[in-house]
Image (tube, rainbow, N blue to C red):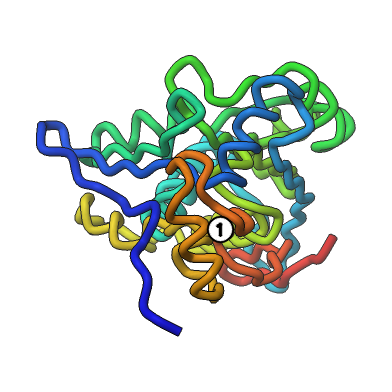
Amino acid sequence: MASRPAFHQWTKSTTSPTSYSRTLATQEFMLSMLNDYARGHSCPYLGVTISVQSSGPSAAGFRAEDLQSRIAQAFVHTRWLHPMVACQIQDRKQMLYKVEDAVDVAKWAARTVQTVESQSGWIEPFSKLSREAVLPSEDGDCAFLYLIVEPEQSGKSQIKQFDLLLHVHHGLTDGAGIRTIMNEVLIGLTSPKLGTCYIWGGEVERLNPAALDVSIISDEATKSVAAMPREVGSIANTSGLGSEEPRHVLTTPGSSPSRR
């Protein structure tokens, strides 16, 4: 099989601020169209319930005033590893990633990590968001992470149980990918010292290619795809972030995990 060109390459902008963009492959284009016209049916969600239990004399849980900050830091950690969570879909034809400094990354996390109170865990917010949430948002964001706490928990000094709900534009990831994203959030939450020295701009090396560009296809199919318009030029499924199962477990020093 002959070597073939990449049909949807990431291209660096020639102006400041720096950004990277590529055209959408067919599957990504179709998912973007569905997102606009069949709201709630084309954006993956993943909810997890998290319990923290102590295995020693120290108190288990997270301080209420620190929890959202810790989760925002975990989402920043996730962006460093998987910058696709901060990509934007523009005009249903293009994927865009803006290279930002630490200050702007913190602003992104402040926009995309939100706290919600609910008596029924992540199920109730999921039901509401699946009907009402629009991605991309007015700011162009295509991934949101919701911290969900029960009202009685939010008033306690130590929160021992809470939920997380991840909502991502389907053009950025598939079902396997959203599990990997959540897994990285949980790793970042249990390891608060991770990524204290990010050098922003280096994460672009981990921007996902279109699935077409990494798929094994025949030379005949390659020639057929090459003749198609770029925004509808893919015969492959959209690229995901991986297939690793999430660990719905959190531990703090001196704590044992509790699985839900």
- x 53%, y 61%: residue: 211
Q: Secondary structure at mark 1?
A: loop
Q: Quadrant of residue 4?
A: bottom left
User: Quick check: 163 left or right of 102?
Assistant: right
Residue 84, given in percent of the width and then of the height, sits at 45, 48
Position of residue 215 relative to residue 197, above or below, is: below
Q: Residues within 10 Å of mark 1 (few under 14, many from 20)?
A: many
- x 11%, y 38%: residue: 14
Residue 216, given in percent of the width and then of the height, sits at 54, 76
Position of residue 36 relative to residue 202, above or below, is: above
User: Quick check: 249 left or right of 32?
Assistant: right
Q: Quadrant of residue 127?
A: top right
- x 63%, y 57%: residue: 237
User: Quick check: 178 left or right of 189?
Assistant: right
Q: Which residue is mark 1?
A: 239
Q: Is residue 260 visible?
A: yes
Quarter of the picture containing the C terminus is bottom right
The three-letter amino acid code for the residue at tag 1 is: Ser
- x 59%, y 54%: residue: 238
Position of residue 22 relative to residue 93, above or below, is: below
Q: From this viewpoint, which residue is outermost toward the bottom?
A: 1
Residue 176, given in percent of the width and then of the height, sits at 68, 61
Q: From this viewpoint, which residue is outermost toward the right?
A: 120
Q: Is residue 70 visible?
A: no
